[in-house]
Amino acid sequence: MAWRVGVDIGGTFTDVAVMNEATGHTGIAKVSTTPHDFGEGVLNGLRRAIEAQGVVPAEVSFVSHATTVVTNALLQGKGARVALVCTKGFRDLLELRRSARSDLYDINQDAPSVLVPRHCRLEVDERIDAQGEVVTALETADVNKLIESIRLLNVEAIGVCLLFAFLNDVHEAEIGVRLRAAFPNKSVFLSSEVLPEIREFERLSTTAVCAYVGPILDSYLRGLEIAIGRLGFPSLYVMGSSGGVFDVEEGLKMPAMAVESGPAAGVMAAAQLGHQTGKPNLISFDMGGTTAKASLIENGDVKTTSEYEVGGQGNVNRWMNGTGHPIRVPVVDLAEVSAGGGSIAWIDPGGALRVGPESAGAVPGPVCYGRGGNRPTVTDADVVLGYLNPAYLLGGRLAINRDAAVEAIHTHIAEPLGLDVLTAASGIVEVVNHSMADALRIVSVERGYDPREFSLVAFGGAGPVHAAALAEELDLGEIIIPPIPGGFSALGLVTTDLRRDYSRTYYATIAGADPKVMNDLFLEMEQAGQAMLGASGISESRRRLTRSADCRYVRQAYELNVPFDEGPITAKALDQLAKTFHTRHRHVYGHENPNEAVQIVNVRLTATGYLPRVPFTADASDSGPSLPARSVWFPQGGEVKCPVLTRGRLREDGKAAGPLIIEELDTTVVVPPGWAAEVDDRGFMILVKTNNDACREGKE
């Protein structure tokens, strides 16, 4: 028997998902997240998995981890002390940024804080031009001075980003050799290794981010790897933001790859669920303790983007220009809002009810948890309305104080607004639902898709509680509740593949492109990808190298990524690339211009190592004891006495119409009036509308 283990750190709970490779059986262990030391929560979760799920560490074949260390360091401004080396005259580029602002009409807004202070940004006298030719040679004496200056700064990491190094890295490489020899115990990141792509500011920002978080990620992962090794587990893999895992050494070469690892894992798990159920068009919805995330999966394909910013003030919107620090790495294309079970409800100066972005998190948590929280949250509202068990959660391990939740909502929301407690609680839920529905619209309607053509996959500890209300708002007709929904992102960690993305800038029109140069660029990336997969022990039969190119019309400023056919680059292959780009442009923007010249900007390669597929199943064989019915408040008709079932009981009883509550160890599923629920042969729960016409009339 062999097991796979995935560990995902959330804002409130740390989830450990386990999968039996022989049977596909899945299980979960949940422990409280430990913000003071995330590694402690990981180890607690692994010990809990050993105890509760019968996992034997010696029988574990694969351990994967989604970490929030990189994101937290950027959001909290607690990264490493960094020296940044730039071409003479360009050290202020990190501060000048682009002209984009998150709020076009707010003239008082401040740009995100600069990761590297000015006195730690150093210059060298060298110059390479836009054709990659050396204009001013790098002098040895300048490098010697640079080393002495860095020595005086006492930094923990060094980043190097020289002008046009993506075309010719001769000067960066020379500086890198000297710095690594002079500072063998410090991390050195070269932009030509991190991101050999056009756009100076984005390349500089990505390099600075890697240097800023690199030492912290290094310390965390190496310490964690030693600790889990002592428990008997194998080497650790890390989830990347593009939807694949990589080993620790590969991750430390490019720390920015680990920024959105947790949310990416959930989307990849949703994609596999779609493959198993024969439903390739899905919208994944993940609601945890602090945030809610949505992503669209079309024909089984998970979309990625490299337009991404992190670390902005208030974490407003990581896909909005001007909110944070740009990092040019592939990231699963998702929309994220500060709306979770721990999101705090409050009244703004105008007397309007607001929810979030501030969260009670794991400490002190919602008021009903009895851990010191005193401000009402979404979870408190869910308890008061009867959606969540008013006595306990997590199978009885987490006691719930409903009276404390009632008092908090009464004091902070109901009384100031002149409402009764139930109406105030329903208002909190309605506000947060509207916020999360916006995330679903961003990935569907605003991308040109009709959400009614997709099924909603709801997971996260709070996702199934609110899923039906969101589906009503977007007129979705079907919801899928996967196995271990409260730890589904952790489950995604054990079902995904190894992946690493490579890129090179090649700036030419398709008509003027040199096939030999392009073949050489792809060959260079393919060799790097093969070496990475080989080092991870992936057999050649399980490797795949996928090509693509960033293309645009000549006068455009930004590109679309389009697939590139396999095989040698020829004139015919380039013509096909142009046709593919025109089609893609029409799909995204609604128009195309076949007579306009198409320009290649970057070529990309994705190296994937496929792990053996293990279809996961939900354990719904045990119906469990009958649960007492309870009063639940629904906007369709107020308080209703609702039956409360388990997933196993629902499977035995067959299709059941709402209103209905289904309780599981790691989540609660709310089935409102007008919906029905059933469990299929694999243990997946399906919710379907039973009164589509009535729902539409109610909205109109």
Image: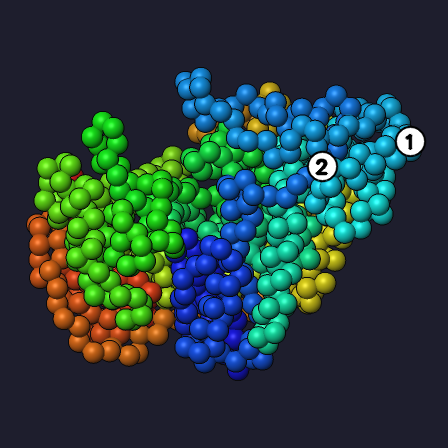
Q: Mark 1: which amino acid?
A: Ala
Query: For residue 545, which numbered disc appears in the image?
Result: none
Secondary structure, mark 1, is helix
For the residues marked 1 and 2, what is the alpha-carbon distance in whole angstroms? 19 Å
At 48% from the left and 63% from the top, the residue drawn is 41
Q: Is residue 3 above or below residue 501?
A: below
Q: Is residue 597 visible?
A: no
Q: Mark 2: which amino acid?
A: Ala
Q: Is residue 103 above or below residue 336?
A: above
Q: Position of residue 462 (x, y in %)?
A: 31, 55
Q: Looking at this rendering, what residue extends furthest in the bottom direction? A: 1
Q: Is residue 289 above or below residue 563?
A: below
Q: Which residue is mark 1?
A: 141
Q: Position of residue 539 (x, y in %)?
A: 68, 67
Q: Is residue 465 visible?
A: yes
Mark 1 closeness class: few <14, some 14–19, many ≥20 residues within 10 Å: few
The front one of 49 and 579 is 49
Q: Is residue 470 above or below residue 313?
A: below
Disc on the earlier residue, 1 or 2: 2
Secondary structure, mark 2, is strand
Q: Position of residue 508 (x, y in %)?
A: 71, 29
On the rendered structure, is 443 left or right of 537?
left
At 52% from the left and 46% from the top, the residue drawn is 71
Question: The C terminus lies in which quarter of the figure?
Answer: top left
At 60% from the left and 68% from the top, the residue drawn is 227
The quadrant in which residue 488 appears is: bottom left
On the rendered structure, is 410 left or right of 502?
left
Q: Which residue is mark 2?
A: 83
Q: Position of residue 32 (x, y in %)?
A: 40, 62
